[in-house]
Image (cartoon, rainbow, N blue to C red):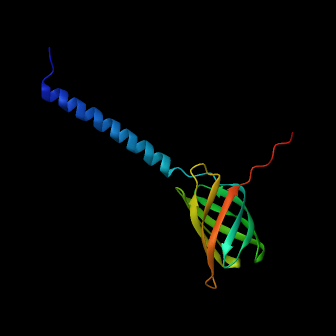
Amino acid sequence: MQAHPRSRRALWVAMALAVCIGSTAAVATARSSTLHLGGKWTGTYTGSYSGTFTINWTQSGSKLTGTINLSRPKGIYGINGSVNGDAISFGAVTAGATYTGSVSKSGKSMGGKYVTANGGSGHWAAQKYVPKKKT
């Protein structure tokens, strides 16, 4: 018994839709997963202020807390932030700076812009710290 041409066409359309819906769901799941940024990061900043920094993050879901050690203005400041997909934002309230940017797909680098309470601004970039293996 042969299937009616309309039945075959409907079957092909249904299969194509199932493939498209499955692919879309997989992409949405991958994008909504939170990157794991906990640990130590090192980086640089340029602009109104220039220097180096070290961040130590603790992550709980999309929330980030920790410290940033700035070379200028010199000091260690508490920071709070969040990550949503590849977007990151955090602030060092006592230093008067807020940072926004994006995280690489690998979760090993990030960068963006900063603004200060006194109107300064610039760019920043950081890499996840990976300790050297002992030989």
The reply, left or right, for residue 133 in relation to residue 84 is right
Q: Position of residue 69 (x, y in %)?
A: 76, 68
The quadrant in which the N terminus is found is top left
In the orientation shown, which residue stands out farthest toward the bottom? Answer: 118
Residue 4: x, y in percent?
12, 24
Check the image and name the residue furthest to the top: 1
**Is 78 in front, or is 44?**
44
Which residue is rendered at x = 66% and y = 79% of the image?
Answer: 48
Where is residue 103 drawn, in percent x and y? Answer: 58, 57
Q: Is residue 55 left or right of residue 84?
A: right
Residue 5 versus residue 112 in the image, above or below: above
Name the image quarter holding the C terminus: top right
Image location (x, y in percent) of residue 127? 69, 56
Q: Quadrant of residue 60?
A: bottom right
**Above or below, comparing residue 77 to residue 66 in the picture:** below
74 in relation to 19, above or below: below
Is 37 located above or below residue 25 in the figure? below
Residue under the point 68% across and 69% down: 45
Residue furthest to the right in view is 135
Residue at 44% x, 42% y: name it.
26
Horizontal side of 57 relative to 98 (left or right) equals right
Residue 79 located left or right of residue 18: right
